[in-house]
Image (cartoon, rainbow, N blue to C red):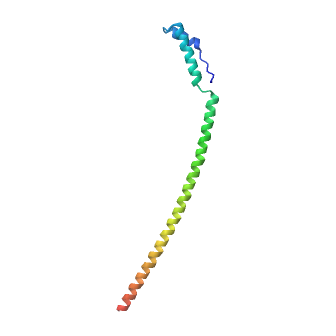
Amino acid sequence: MTAFILDTLAYADALKAGGFSAQQAETQARALAEILGRQMATKAEVAEHESNLQRDIESLRVELKRDIRETELKLEAKLAETKADLTRWVVGVGVLQTTIVVGVLLKVAKLI
């Protein structure tokens, strides 16, 4: 349970001045002090949560860098594969084109 200091007497006096009965004011002051005491975080709790968040953020940052590097490596492999395929196509088309040109020249040479 978190320690929280609330001047319940001053709060009850303010409620009495506003028209609450003494019993209503004191009950309200005690209830508010209890609720605030359960829901308020101490500096140590906030610091612990902040530390946990920082650790989680750093862990995510490392994981994200690893995922980015893996993606880069996959892309590099795909690019190399694509480059090899493109080179095969260019060489194949070049050979085919040369064959066609030589064939046409031989055909033309026979006609002359």
Above or below 45: residue 11: above
In the image: residue 55, left or right of residue 107: right
Residue 102 in the image, given as x and y percentages of width and height: 42, 84
Q: Residue at x 62, y 30 (%)?
A: 45
Q: At which x and y percent is residue 61?
A: 58, 46
- Spot occupied by residue 68 in the image (x, y as percentages of width and height): 55, 52
Q: Residue furthest right?
A: 44
The part of the image, by quadrant, that contains residue 49 is top right
Is the residue 10 above or below the residue 75 in the image?
A: above
Location of residue 7 with respect to 55 vertically, above or below: above
> What residue lies at 55% left-to-right and 18% top-to-bottom?
32
Total numbered labels placed on residues in the image = 0
- Residue 98 percent across, percent down from the top left: 44, 80
Q: For the point 40% across and 81% down, which residue is it?
A: 100
Q: Quadrant of the C terminus?
A: bottom left
Write down the quadrant of residue 76 in the picture: bottom right
Q: Quadrant of residue 34?
A: top right
The residue lying furthest to the left in this view is: 111
Q: Quadrant of the N terminus?
A: top right
